[in-house]
Image (cartoon, grey):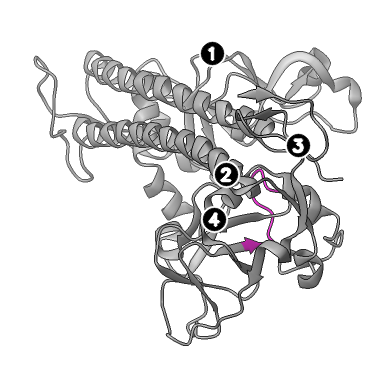
Amino acid sequence: MNSDKNTNSTPRLRFPGFTGEWEKKKLSDIFDRITDRNVEDIKNVLTISAQYGLVSQLDFFKKSVAASDVTGYYLLHKGDFAYNKSRSLGRPVGAIKPLKMYDKGVVSTLYICFRCKNPNEVDFWEQYFDAGIFDKEIMTIAQEGARIHGLLNVPINDFFGLAVLTPKPAEQEKISECLSAVDAMIAVQEKKVDSLKERKRGLMQQLFPLPGETDPLLRFPGFTGEWVKKKLANAATSFSGGTPKSSEPRYYGGTIPFIRSGEIHSTETALFITEEGLNNSSAKLVNKGDLLYALYGATSGDVAISKINGAINQAILCIRSKEINSCFLCNYLERIKETVTSRYLQGGQGNLSSDIIMSLTIPLPSLAEQEKIAMCLSEMETLITAESVRMEALKSHKRGLVQQLFPQSIK
């Protein structure tokens, strides 16, 4: 690859033999709008996932959230694009994705749909939209604060009048081939991680007793006898924390990591508090190795062994026990997460409480058998972590390539 002097209409990095500025065009020069209706009454209703693209609602939500009559929905064919104007993770103005997984599908008319005039360019434009350059253009026409049903107000005509930058077809093909190859490596790595996670789930199914049973399906040599069921409150102690007043700046910016429910798996926190903040609030200190259980919010039911010393707020329950191995308990609570949340969180909403968690009945073998099970599952988790790190490295590599293979602004 060659490193060119970067201008607003040229990338920093180019393949040999390609020079000159990319051509500025309107979106309508490249694409035709799709308004074809679902007269075939196709039932494959699609939704846009920033991670997976256009996927079936049944696959993504495990149910259909569409209207019972979808004959008025837009009909898409493989290779067609759809723009979901709703904010998603990493996409403040929504996501644009092509249909790749199915031959046909239908989407809500709230989406903006369009088709490449040249079908050979689909892969390039998929990468272009993923690169985020076009997001900056959308922001110029999205009416601030104007949201309809949680969607950005993006006028159709203004949308198709937005500018894009395009190189010659041969350079398009080279870029899409390069990035698609990296995508393929990421997909292989994701499958490896998912396979290891599935293997761990399978082990957990065998190493812990099934509901209503007192013995697991699989035991390590030398261990016999029934497991004993105990209410967690009778075998462990627990406490939650609190949050220093946000109106007191002196309580923040200190050296104590302030762990929130979405950070219980992490080695870092976004906030730090001071000793004064700790002493003048209900925040409580936890130690590396403590078991942390998320009670509130989107992460309700998540459980982890703390990787750091820090302070917790009221959304986290710290559980300590001399009778139960923390890693054993963490894995057991992870295994029954769906059972707990489906029972106590109505429609996935609401909060758990320390009373709910500490009232759970836990099947317990001897401490020695707990440690053996914990060691086995920890080794599996170490493998998952190592492969996940490799996957993130590939994603980081792609992000770096994208920053160099596409111009980062349009002037």
Residues under labels 4 and 1: Cα distance? 49 Å
Disc 4 residue type? Answer: Val
Say whether residue 303 is magenta.
no
Q: Which portion, as a residue range, is magenta?
A: 83-92
Instruction: Sort mark 1 into few (<14), some (14-19) or many (20+) by Cα contacts within 10 Å.
Output: few
Residue 122 - label: 4
Disc 1 residue type? Answer: Lys
- Mark 2, secondary structure of its residue: helix
Decide: is 410 above or below 402.
below
Contact, CB < 8 Å: mark 2 with mark 1?
no
- Mark 1, secondary structure of its residue: loop
Residue 288 - label: 1
Residues under labels 3 and 1: Cα distance? 49 Å
Residue 273 in view in this figure? yes
- x, y (%) of residue 47? 52, 63
Disc 2 residue type? Answer: Ala
Contact, CB < 8 Å: mark 4 with mark 3?
no
| Sequence-first tag of 2 and 1 | 2
- x, y (%) of residue 166? 69, 49
Disc 3 residue type? Answer: Thr
- Mark 3, secondary structure of its residue: loop
In depth, the one of 364 and 65 nearer the eye is: 65
Residue at 55%, 79% in the rendered image: 73
Residue 170 - label: 2
Q: Where does label 3 land, which residue?
A: 10
Residue 296 in view in this figure? no
- Mark 4, secondary structure of its residue: helix
Say whether residue 85 is magenta.
yes
Residues under labels 3 and 2: Cα distance? 15 Å
In depth, the one of 298 and 152 nearer the eye is: 152
